[in-house]
Amino acid sequence: MTNLHRTPRRTSGLAVVPGSTQATDRAASVSPVPAPGRTPAPVTAPGPVAHRENARPGTPHARRWLILGIASAAQFLAVLDLIGVTIAFPAIGRDFASASTAQLSWVLNAYTVVLAAFLIPAGRIADETGRRRSFLLGMVLFGLASAACGAAPTTAALIAARVVQGLAAAVLIPTSLSLALPAFPPRERATAVGVWTAVSAVAASSGPVIGGVLAAVDWRWIFLVNVPVVVVAVAAGVRFLPRSAPGLRQRPDLVGTALILLCVGALVTGCVQVPEWGLTAPGTLAALAVGGLAGALCAVHVRRAADPVVRPDLFRTRGFTVATLGLLAYFVAYSAATLGATLLFTDLWHYSTPSAGLALAPWPLTVLVVSAFSGRIVRAAGERPTALIGALCFVAAPVWWLCLAGNGGNYAVEFLPGLVLAGFGTGLYQPVMFAVAGRLPAERLSLGSGVLMVSRQGGTALGVAVLTAVLGQRITAEALDTGWVLMAVAAALAVLAAALLRGPEGTGAR
């Protein structure tokens, strides 16, 4: 009689079930012992495996810093095209003289709204189809859309190209983080995210300067300059980015996806249109109401659907919900501080736009320095204390400006210390909060990164909208004082989130 319960074959003292993944891995990792007198056959490393993601989580990738550099290039382009285009509005308006101010505003708003709305669906698709593939496709699409923006013959064509560019950025941003994080062991992830954060901060602060210089030649160069960067990044990505196997395909959640697009799109539209429509305008209130209703319906839907676009257990990952809310509060303060500082320089202290951009430079420069040590600080002090210190520094920045910044224009005394405090806050807080994505299951890393990025984009739009509503049509020192108070309150909420942050399993409060 055939024995249906055969003892597994043993290799080197380890039980290996034939046909299992363990058997395959064992066969690939154990070198055969040559027979006496025979020359062993040369062993060659299989090519594709060398480029795949690490089989064991937490194992450092040999090319992890190069992977981070490619991912950061995508982050830089996506943020630069969000900020730098603003400075080109006058030049674009001169070329398209028939366009109204409201139409021109959608050159920026179309990118912002589409980027925010598609982050979560794009993250899920990247997890299911492969992050490397999605990143490269997103980069190619971003380059083509940039070229179309630079060659746009009409305002409508420019806005349409910006929509495609925003869609490409929605693919790039979550996949850039989800490609980089697995390449680093947990102890280096705060440093890696710190570098990624610093690149974003440099792109945001240098946007007005780079945009101003390029717009002085021709505003189209703001978009065309992306093309050679994309070509280099794609070539490097094809060669060096780790291959990731496609994740488990699920049934598409069309209802959930539609509700997320409607929720995020309507809320961000309502926020970005506040300068044009006003905070209490019917259009603004309607957009916010539609977004809120869609969000409520989506929350109900994902609890009942078999394969929801965002699974509720994603938010049961240790620290993920706190990080999501903390980043939302932080970016409300961050975007309001950036806009408030720019308006102070240009409207009250009468700096030129490029000079205002240079005046903001100590902020990202401080982030660069702090980010280099963020990993060591996290290892020495723990995640929660590091995030707390960062958030408290960010509270101190608007408090400093509230107490000292006014019509005097003494930059070194009234404003520079606050920029340095904001830089310390950015360099310590963001790496800890974004690194929480590294705790997610590998098959949901891009989706989770997309959720965190929605917090960033939503907070950015909300901060600008609230500050714009507070300031009104005329910028005064008194109105900015109210803005500084609102920034401090938002940053205080980020402090609360840091206080509630729990470390990974087994690390307690750290």
Image (spheres, rainbow, N blue to C red):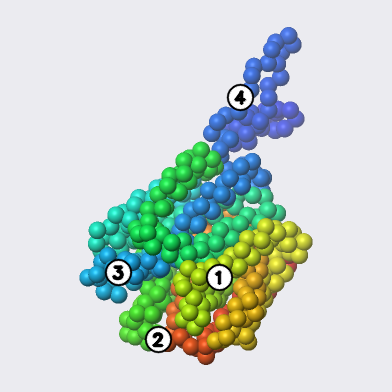
Distance from label 1 to label 3 (Cα)?
26 Å
Give amino acid for label 3: Gly
Residue 45, image quadrant: top right
Side of 1 relative to 272 (left or right): right
The secondary structure type at the circle numbered 3 is helix
Distance from label 2 to label 3 (Cα)?
21 Å
The residue pinned by badge 4 equals 44
The residue pinned by badge 3 equals 93
Residue 333, image quadrant: bottom right
Out of 398 and 3, give the one closest to the viewer.
Answer: 398
Marks 1 & 3, CB-CB < 8 Å contact = no
Is any part of residue 168 visible from this angle? yes
Give amino acid for label 4: Thr
The structure residue drawn at horizontal position 55% and vertical position 71%, both measured from the top left corner, is 359
The residue pinned by badge 2 equals 473
The structure residue drawn at horizontal position 43% and vertical position 57%, both measured from the top left corner, is 169
- View extreme (right): residue: 380
Is any part of residue 507 visible from this angle? no
Give amino acid for label 2: Gln
Distance from label 4 to label 3 (Cα)?
60 Å
Of labels 2 and 1, the one closer to you: 1
Q: Is residue 439 above or below residue 262?
A: above
The quadrant the C terminus occupies is bottom right
Image location of residue 150, percent across then percent down? 33, 56
Distance from label 4 to label 1 (Cα)?
53 Å
